[in-house]
Image: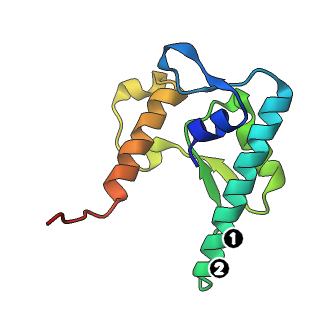
Amino acid sequence: MTSEQLVESVGKYRAPGGDDSLVLEDDEGRGQLFERVLVEVQRSVDACERSFPFFSVARVFLGSVPEEAGLLAHLSANLYIPVEPLELEQVMRLPASSATWSPAERGRFLKLIGAGLRPEEKVH
């Protein structure tokens, strides 16, 4: 489930102007959204640990969410494994101007990384 689907599922909206940050109308909506994200992360971790019992998930990385949104703090308080922000500089070379990028701009690189990790399918 993407962040867009989660926001739509609790009846909220995205910021005007194409900004990728989450905009929530009230604290109740934010709480509902965070609980849905928490459940999805827990399910994913559980599925990985059941499918691959020879290793365990050591931590969860959270990418491109503004700190003031509070999602990192919520997940950290409610998951049994550590949750850390993903620093793109640790996994790819970025231009010097990247220090001024917003979380939404940094998030665009996550889509690129995800696309690069997908196996190529041959079409006949």
Relative image position of residue 40 (x, y in whole percent)? 68, 55
Q: Please state the horizontal and vertical placement of residue 82, each as a whole percent of the image.
A: 72, 57
User: Relative to 47, does residue 6 appear above or below in the rendering?
Assistant: above
| Name of the residue lying farthest toward the bottom | 54
Q: Give the amino acid at mark 2.
A: Arg
Q: Which residue is mark 1?
A: 46
Q: Can residue 40 be seen? A: yes
Q: Residue at x 74, y 55 (%)?
A: 39
- For disc 2, the marked residue is 50
Camera sees residue 58: no
* Disc 2 secondary structure class: helix
Query: Residue 96, image x and y in percent?
Result: 36, 28
In the image, 72 versus 119, the foreground residue is 119
Q: Is residue 95 above or below residue 114?
A: above
> Can you say which quadrant of the picture contains the C terminus?
bottom left
Kind of residue sitting beneath label 1 = Asp
- In the picture shown, does residue 105 fall above or below 15? below
Q: Residue reaching furthest right?
A: 28
Say which of 60 and 29 sits in front: 29
CB atoms at circles 1 and 2 under 8 Å apart? yes
- Residue at (52%, 43%) from the top-left corner? 87
Q: Residues within 10 Å of mark 1 (few under 14, many from 20)?
A: some
Image point 82% across, 53% down: which residue? 78
